[in-house]
Image: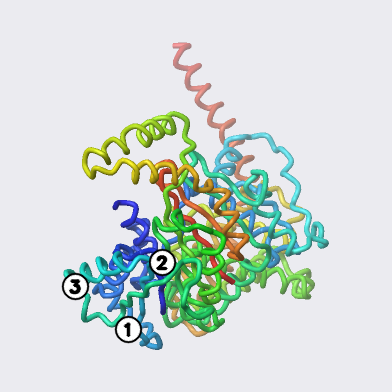
Amino acid sequence: ELSRRYFASRLSLTAPIGWANSVSTQPRHFVEHVVVRRTGPSAMASFLVARRLLCPASARRLLPCTSPPPSAPAALCWLSTDASPSPPLPVPPLEPTVDPPKKDGASFSAGSGAGGAYRTGQGAASGGRRSGGAGYEEEQQKVLRASLLHVPRMGWSESAMIAGARDVAMSPAIVGAFPRKEAALVEFFMDDCLQQLMDRIDAGEGELLKNLMLTERLSRLVRMRLEMQTPYISKWPQALSIQSQPANVSTSLKQRAVLVDEIWHAAGDAGSDIDWYVKRTVLGGIYSASEVYMLTDNSPEFHDTWTFVNRRIKDALDLQKSYKEVAYLTETLGAGIGGSIQGVLNKVFQK
Amino acid sequence: MKHLDVAGGTGDVAFRVVERIKSVSHRATQGTLTDMEEDTHIYVCDINPNMLEVGKKRAAEKGYNEEQCLSWVQGDAEALSFEDGSMDGYTIAFGIRNVTHIEKALSEAYRVLKKGGRFLCLELSHVDVPVFKDIYDIYSFSVIPAVGELVAGDRQSYQYLVESIRRFPKQEKFAQMIQEAGFEAVEYENLVGGVVAIHSGVKL
């Protein structure tokens, strides 16, 4: 009886997490099936990210998914005083000979580290997902891409995904098979924007950047990326809240890390004393702040946001460059102050 | 949208689906999905007309007789009477174990589903968790038939039940069978350590 109830609930869309209920705008239609709940959301996220990084959309440039989240190492780097050489930057187009259909089947095993095309969950509580090849991935992407057109009207919700599925002549029941539904849509959008950014850089805008200063290059790139969000700006707060849900936060952090890495790479960070992790952390912070600023910006064509971005980047880089100067200054001051305190103590103890 | 529940004569899954459609929260959705005015229809299919009668009686008790969305159809899971590509969803709860040729049932499911349609199967399955497995075996072979004899006076049926559970393919094997029938994105989820498993697949 219990299992029947659970089974029937799989047909409808009771959200597995109460948080999602409060955030997602629309209740679901019964045919949208609840996604399989797997154990280990972090394992799932890493699996998804690996899949995404190896999927055709980003197959051209393999970004290091081993790049650690900027926050943790940055703290360590601040504490360490030695100027260790920063890790080498990711080498751009690795094997362009990656064959997308084959990779899709192989990516599951690559991402999960388990043998075979599926993965066994911990504690034998869940089972593997088998891919029939590139077919399912492509169809999923088609549906998600069609759903994006409905997002400005319906938000990042199952309604948009159902409408998208109808546009592509698929039964809306397929939406039930997407992992974490609205999050799948948001993550697809983030990947798509990243891919567009990379394409634009490769197509020639990268050349235009060469003549600018580092701060201007970064501003230009951040602006390029944020402009892709302008059609969805009315519903972007919802996307942000979806990304911050516990089940989705690890994937969204990874996506942002990859994005920031890509921007720094395109800006070409030569000739700087700043540590690798610190750069990414700083830019990640600026990007997120600008993204949030943009939500309440009503100026024509987001003029104020671009000013904000420019100013923040300038401040950040100036601060970093003057870090060394501050270090010398404090050393000198320390020497001076230490000297005078010593003098006072000598006088005291002489008496 | 059309949904087919096979071997669901007593209507358990179907009623829950109807409740979900008719719920207030669902009605609230209609505002945004203006082009989804068409009604959802649920077909309940069972090989045993007596089960269907029980289901109809229960529907009357729950007050679903006026509902246009429920249909009770007698049919064989291995040879469904529905057209190709006519269903958005196909569910079979605790029924596929009793089908003689599981591959036929799976290929029929594949046939009647639309593109993008989802196949869901709920079934008693195998337990692999070390200690729990032994407890489960002892419980299945010693306790269940005995209780069946005491309560229902029918030891044979419950012996058959337990043995048919063991004869059913394991989760992985069954997932493979589903994939061979043509479904994509096949996955399964174990409940209670494997006592029950939900397999799902998508037709593309």
Q: Secondary structure at mark 1?
A: loop
Q: Is residue A251 visible?
A: yes
Q: Nearer the viewer, mark 1 or mark 2?
A: 2
Residue assigned mark 3: B60
- Apparent side of residue A38 relative to residue A110 in the rendered image (left or right): left
Q: Position of residue A2 (x, y in %)?
A: 30, 51
Q: Are marks 1 and 3 on the same chain?
A: yes
Dividing the picture into quadrants, the one containing residue A264 is bottom right
> In the image, which disc is placed on residue B31?
1
Q: Residues within 10 Å of mark 3 (few under 14, many from 20)?
A: few
Dividing the picture into quadrants, the one containing residue A295 is bottom left
Q: Amino acid at mark 1?
A: Gly
Q: CA distance from mark 1 to mark 3?
A: 30 Å
Q: Residues within 10 Å of mark 2 (few under 14, many from 20)?
A: many
Mark 1 or 2 closer to N-term? 2
Q: Position of residue B121 (x, y in %)?
A: 45, 59
Mark 1 or 3 closer to N-term? 1
- Apparent side of residue A125 relative to residue B57 in the rendered image (left or right): right
